[in-house]
Image: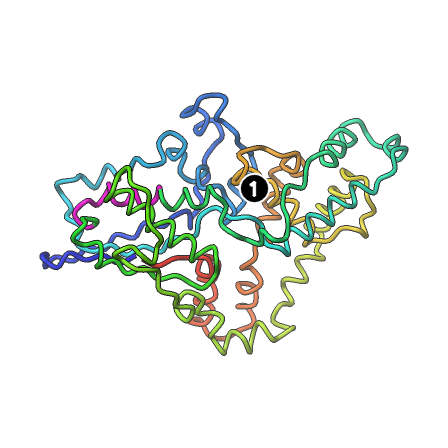
Amino acid sequence: MMLRDPRRLLRVSVAPAAALAVAVLSSLSRCSLLEPEDCVISALSPYFGTKTRYEDVNPGLLLDPEAPRRDPELLEETCTPVQLVALIRHGTRYPTAKQIRKLRQLHGLLQAREPGDDKTCAAGSHDLRAALAAWPLGYAEWMDGQLVEKGWQDMRQLALRLASLFPALFSFENYCRLQLITSSKHRCVDSGAAFLQGLWQHYHPGLPPPDIADMECGTPRINDKLMRFFDHCEKLLTEVERNATALYHVEAFKTGPEMQNIVKKVAATLQVPVSNLSADLIQVAFFTCSFDLAIKGVKSPWCDVFDIDDAKVSASFLPSHPSVWSCRDTSSTAFSHGLLQRQGAPNSLQL
């Protein structure tokens, strides 16, 4: 998002990032702010990376998601913002179709267990396996990474917070100076639309927003060459994406002792053969805890499959890491630095 006040000569940039960085917050500090019934948390939350629930990054959202929070060191009268540039991640989304298929595969392994097989389980493993088998799948392939209703709400509320925090920049006179850029991913396009709906609420409180195309500011502009630059980088495509040897470290991690220990542990918990599980399925099981927290506001039994040590290993197996690891096989520092930016960029909005 880019807004500029033409009346000012002084130029100051403020770049708030919506949950691109994950703050490691203790469960105690989060719960102290909330009523007991609102405190749905998991000790694994600090390790979910970009799948972290936004409320775990900013606990204040649970108290008042529309109230802006100013850095106390930036007093209102000591800083005059004249331009705002923000790189904003999309709102809360469903798992992708690929993730849902893997989750269904895990669910099928649990459902395929014979009733008599549970006699050999330890009591704790039996109880957890039974809870997992009874836990509803809850996701269908058509959802495929789409923005959930809460995701629309995330972006509307973010717009309201920014407009309240920077009233001069977000004045109605500046509305059409707004430049909203998004990738073509539907969750990003929808996030941009939801952000504009939030601004409409700010300018026209109490009135239902019109279609995005009918708003004064117009629809978000799609620019994949900017927002998904890695898809258009020939060096990345040639030396990494189409180069099997560049992903050596990824496969080494999947088959390494740390990940294989977790595979064996989860196999014992689910009472399924180790050969039926893989590092990819383990990652989906790990992230199912985060999806249920973010989308449904519940702590599912999948959160109890892993402990903190497991989470630290699983956190090393994030979607962007194949690109980061492959940097070890490149000689260009600039190229490697570019790869490190990949994690947030595909699903981001620039306004």
Task: Please provide the residue range marked out in magenta.
Answer: 157-169
Image location (x, y in percent) of residue 84: 24, 54
Which residue: 53% across, 40% down?
Answer: 295
Asked if residue 9 is among those painted magenta in the image, a careful observer would answer: no
> Which amino acid is tagged 1?
Ser
Is residue 60 left or right of 11 when viewed as pictured? right
174 lies above or below 272? below
Which residue, as the protein is rendered here, is positioned at the far top? 36
Q: Which residue is mark 1?
A: 290
Image location (x, y in percent) of residue 153: 41, 42
Image location (x, y in percent) of residue 181: 35, 62
**How many numbered discs sit on the rendered protein?**
1
Which residue: 16% across, 53% down?
Answer: 173
- Which secondary structure class fits the magenta region best? helix
Question: Between residues 212 and 28, which one lies in front from this camera angle?
Answer: 212
Q: Give residue 287's quadrant in the image.
A: top right
Q: Local crowd at mark 1 within 10 Å, few (<14), some, or many (≥20)? A: many
Question: Between residues 134 and 269, which one lies in front from this camera angle?
Answer: 134
Asked if residue 163 is among those painted magenta in the image, a careful observer would answer: yes
Q: Give residue 25's quadrant in the image.
A: top left
